[in-house]
Image (cartoon, rainbow, N blue to C red):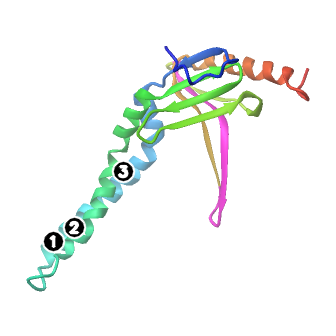
């Protein structure tokens, strides 16, 4: 796989790069939104249908009441179609492991580049599947609000040969730790 020239720094060495299995990536990223979207979309369509068949226009210039449900139908349809969006995204996402960092590069529109220095990786959590593919989580984002604390994990999702990539990542993190000042020797 070729890597963009501007993706790596001059003193970086590529260890591994790959792409997620697009279908598995789409399921991992959107299954909850899809299930909620089915309920949301179904209720919105039910509401619009009920409003359209029950009420009539109150006057020649008034807007029919059912039209207020159209934005909810559109939002629900977007949630139901989210796996297609994630399938498109997964097919174009690239994962990169170098001697200095782990990167996730997602394409436009809504491009995203997540760069995690290896010396900042505090854990490597691997979730293999029976097919040999799986997920490697190595970054956590913790957010707190009035409802409590939410932990969101990120990393390399739906990758083939997950155990091999895990070994490469662990070795790279260990090498970085031994070279860093204050790291374990």
Sequence-wise, which precedes: disc 3 or disc 1? 1
Q: Nearer the viewer, residue 18 or 2?
A: 2
Image-quadrant location for residue 57 = bottom left
According to the image, label 2 marks what residue? 48
Q: Residues within 10 Å of mark 1 (few under 14, many from 20)?
A: some
According to the image, label 1 marks what residue? 52
- Examine the structure image and report whether residue 128 is included in the region drawn in magenta: no
Percent position (x, y) of residue 72? 31, 63
Measure the C-alpha gap from mark 3 to mark 1.
23 Å
Percent position (x, y) of residue 29? 47, 40
Measure the C-alpha gap from mark 1 to mark 2.
6 Å
Residue placed farthest to the left in the image?
60
According to the image, label 3 marks what residue? 79
Percent position (x, y) of residue 56? 11, 79
Mainly helix, strand or loop, the magenta region? strand
Rendered position, 56 above or below 121: below
Rendered position, 101 above or below 39: above
The kind of secondary structure element at disc 2 is helix
The kind of secondary structure element at disc 3 is helix
Measure the C-alpha gap from mark 2 to mark 3.
18 Å
- Examine the structure image and report whether residue 146 is included in the region drawn in magenta: yes
Is 185 on the left or on the right of 108, as rendered? right
Q: What is the span of residues highlighted in magenta in the rendered image?
A: 132-149
Q: Are marks 1 and 2 in contact (CB under 8 Å)?
A: yes
Rendered position, 18 above or below 84: above
Q: Are marks 3 and 1 in contact (CB under 8 Å)?
A: no
């Amino acid at each position: 796989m070729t890597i963009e020239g501007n993706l790596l720094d001059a003193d970086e060495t590529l260890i591994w790069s790959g792409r997620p299995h697009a279908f598995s990536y789409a399921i991992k990223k959107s299954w909850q939104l899809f299930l909620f979207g089915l309920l949301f979309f179904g209720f919105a369509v039910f509401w619009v249908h009920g409003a359209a068949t029950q009420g009539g226009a109150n006057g020649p210039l008034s807007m029919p009441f059912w039209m207020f449900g159209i934005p909810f139908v559109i939002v629900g349809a977007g949630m139901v179609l989210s796996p297609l969006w994630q399938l498109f995204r997964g097919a174009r996402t690239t994962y990169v492991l170098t001697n200095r960092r782990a990167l996730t590069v997602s394409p436009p529109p809504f491009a995203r580049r997540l760069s995690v220095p290896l010396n900042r990786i505090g854990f490597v959590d691997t979730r293999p599947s029976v097919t040999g593919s799986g997920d490697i989580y190595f970054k956590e984002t913790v957010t707190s609000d009035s409802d409590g604390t939410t932990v969101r994990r990120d990393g390399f999702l739906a990758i083939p040969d997950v155990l091999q990539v895990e070994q490469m990542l662990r070795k790279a993190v260990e090498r970085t730790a031994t070279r860093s000042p204050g790291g374990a020797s």
